[in-house]
Amino acid sequence: MKKEIIIAGFGGQGVLSMGKILAYAGLLQGKEVTWMPAYGPEQRGGTANVTVILSDDRISSPILQQFDIAIVLNQPSMDKFEPRVKPGGVLIYDPNGMTREPARKDITIYKVTATETAIAMNAQKTFNMIILGGLLHIAPVVDMEYVMLGLKKSLPERHHHLLAANEMAMKQGATIIEKMN
Amino acid sequence: MEDFKLMKGNEAIAHAAIRCGADGYFGYPITPQSEVMETLMDLKPWETTGMVVLQAESEVAAINMVYGGAGCGKKVMTSSSSPGMSLKQEGISYIACAELPCLIVNVMRGGPGLGTIQPSQADYFQSVKGGGHGDYRLIVLAPSTVQEMADFVGLGFDLAFKYQNPAMILADGIVGQMMEKVVLPPFKPRRTEEEVRQECPWGTTGKLPNRKRNIITSLALEAEVMENINLKLQAKYREIEKNEVRFETHHCEDADYVLVAFGSIARICEKAMEMAREEGYKVGVLRPITLFPFPTNPIKELSKKVKGFLTVEMSAGQMVEDVRLTVNGAVPVEFYGRMGGIVPSAEEILAALKEKLIK
């Protein structure tokens, strides 16, 4: 099985680290993984995105035109990646700051009000983990136990007291994800 | 289970350098390879193995520090990206002439000029055909995975010392910035001073009473002497061509058309190959791993049975010249490329293959 995922949003939303946690989890689960960031000028104050591929077999191209799953966290990312979801694929978005709803009819669309939820939980920095929890609820591309292990690996030790808050955010994400079509 | 790590290609180079017993790294930061020195600074190998890590005042200074270290028989390296590599060319030519081993890493970005920071492969000519002045060659290794970024550090040093010649890892922004799983090479201690003296009797390690002074130079004012130096270099390059060709093929056995590409683009070509095979076209991929020495024989052999080659590069077409020289008109050799930091997609490559060759 192979899953090709794009995560895109503003710099600072935790897009790259969300991808890194997924990649770590995949690695710990014995999968082949690649994590390819857009490291060009777009990451400097603009939009950030990362392609994560999780596969049971050898991965060929790390650069893709089409994705099984797109997670879009701002309007420019929605505009760029909604057309690039494979037919039958999945689009996940956070409506915060969006000016339009996704329009595709041939893909499954999910909404996660992660910004709103993070603020309500008074844990804005766990925003990306709420999204990740939502993703794993509808598409368990990796097992939750490996995600927690992956998180532990990608967080520096001095931040390990935050692991519980992150786990709680993921659980919250799973409860608020909403199918839109 | 093997100990898999998840890291960027640039980080893998830094870890591998320490693990293969490197004595020194000299560099100057430039995107997209700054993580090489950042990782080394973070790992502080001077506290463990004794490896020196130094941010020089410029790329020119860094390559000349490498020249000095290599002259002492030390395992030394530098890394940079395209504009920085241009600055190093004088030093590289001197090191090649003085027949010193060292490792040079180029994580290519779009050019010419200061260019852009996105990936490119437009330094093929510079790396493979010279770059600096004079008739010299580097041993050029082109990694396509993070694993190869790690593995080619040790291999590069081994080949450099075997042939007393600079070796280069010619990577690009994709393989430098991408994270993949990697098994790092086992720790090898740095050589002792005595081991360096034994392995490098030519090194300036201190004059011994029973031998003449070792002099490291690239200057020979008498033309006859200089020609002899050139003849010796050329003989060495022929030896390298005979022994050190490395390449990889995918589905070339029954292929009608073969995509030729190096580095990360070879992986995008693999994806294009998968798509083409799904449509019923018999397509294979040949990936040169060593760019010098170039895999001439395998391409020549394939040219006897395929209908054509498509060379794909992130450049205006550089390696394609070597493919055309090799195939020598036996079958068509077409080219598809993107420039200036744009990465061609598998879809584009497949469309180019159909348009130019399959028709």
Image (tube, coloured by chain):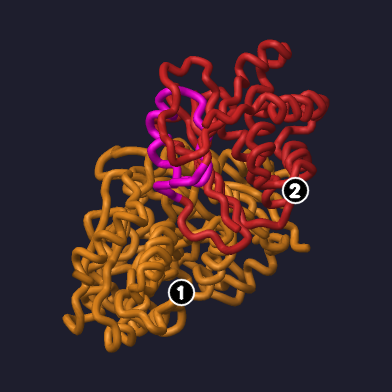
Q: Which residue is mark 2?
A: B48
B304 is within the stretch colored magenta:
no
Q: Which callout, 1 or 2, points at the residue further toward the start of the chain?
A: 2
Q: Residue at x 64, y 51 (%)?
A: B15
Of the 4 image quadrants, the one containing the N terminus of chain B is bottom right
Q: Which chain is orange?
A: B
Q: Residue at x 35, y 80 (%)?
A: B255
Left or right of A171? Residue B33 is left
Q: Residues within 10 Å of mark 2 (few under 14, many from 20)?
A: few
Subunit ID for the residue under disc 2: B
Q: Nearer the viewer, residue B280 or A21?
A: B280
The percent position of residue B179, horizontal first and vertical second, equals: 57, 48
Q: Which residue is mark 1?
A: B248
Q: CA distance from mark 1 to mark 2?
A: 37 Å
Amino acid on which disc 2 is placed: Thr
**Secondary-structure class at tag 1:** strand
The percent position of residue A16, horizontal first and vertical second, equals: 57, 34
Figure disc tally: 2
The percent position of residue A15, horizontal first and vertical second, equals: 56, 31
Amino acid on which disc 1 is placed: Glu
Q: Nearer the viewer, residue B88 or B302?
A: B302
Q: Residue at x 60, y 56 (%)?
A: A55
Picture colour for chain A: red
The percent position of residue B212, horizontal first and vertical second, equals: 52, 73
Subunit ID for the residue under disc 1: B
Q: Residues within 10 Å of mark 1 (few under 14, many from 20)?
A: some
Residue range highlighted in magenta: A63-89
Residue B347 falls in which quadrant of the image?
bottom left
